[in-house]
Structures are given as C-alpha cells and as structure tokens.
Amino acid sequence: MTTLKEREEAFERKFAHDEETKFKIISRRNKLLGLWAAALLNKADADAYAKEVILAEFEEAGDEDVFRKLRADFDAAGVSVSDEELRTKMVDLLRDATLQINPPV
C-alpha cells in the first residue's frame, strides 16, 4: 500500500510541476508577445503593455482572450497585422518561451 501511495504522490508532484512550467511558458510567451505588439503600437511603456497582455490570459481558458485583446488594440490603432500573422507570432513566441523556460540539455 505504501508503494502505491508513494507513486500517487509522485504523480501529483509531477503534475503540479508540469502545470507550473506550462503557466510560466504561457506567461513568458505573452510577455514577449506584448513587447512585440508594444513596438508595433508605438507604446511608450512597453513593459506596462506587456503586463496588460499577460493579464488578458486570465479572462478565459486558451489563447483566444489574448488574441482578441491584440486584435482589438491593433485595429483601434490602425496597425495592419493579419490574423494569420498574429497567430503565427503567437506560435513562434511560444516556441521561444519554451526554450527560455526549458532550455535543451
């Protein structure tokens, strides 16, 4: 019984660690995305804007909340960025964030 309990606890620790890592990667991606968008939007305070993008992540599960925020901000500012370009940038920066949080060994 002890072995089963130890395995269960180990699985729970790994799951918690994996979820924390996933959260860090998504947050880093959103920061990078915010900094990229801030440059296109000519934001005076790029870090503050990046924080807005990070916070947009918490509106709902998935990436659509961040996408909608950026799409609305680009549209309001008259910045021409296609949906495809924005989604591609999100994927590219997710890869970059993953490498920054979990560098290859």
Image: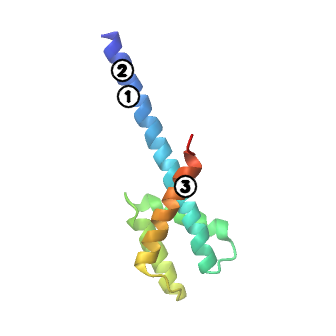
User: Which residue in the structure is indicated by mark 1?
Assistant: 11
Q: Residue at 39% of width from left, 23% of height from top?
A: 9
| Residue 52 appears in the picture as rendered | no
Residue sitting farthest toward the top? 1
Q: Amino acid at mark 3?
A: Ala
Check disc 3 and report its element: helix, strand or loop.
helix
Q: Residue at x 46, y 47 (%)?
A: 22
In three-dimensional space, the C-alpha distance between marks 3 and 1, rounded to whole angstroms, equals 25 Å
Q: Secondary structure at mark 1?
A: helix
- Can you see residue 63? yes
Identity of the amino acid at label 1? Phe
Image quadrant containing the N terminus: top left
CA distance for labels 3 and 2 = 31 Å
Graded by Cα atoms within 10 Å as few (under 14), some (14 to 19) or many (20 or more), the crowding at tag 3 reads many
Is residue 63 depicted above or below 10 in this figure?
below
The amino acid sitting under disc 2 is Arg
Which residue, given by chain and number where applicable, does mark 2 sit on? 7
Give the distance between the C-alpha atoms of the residues marked 1 and 2, in whole angstroms: 6 Å
Query: Can you identify the residue that label 3 sits on?
Result: 97
Q: Position of residue 87 (x, y in %)?
A: 43, 70
The front one of 2 and 87 is 87
Left or right of residue 42, residue 74 in this image: left
Left-right relation of 35 to 3: right
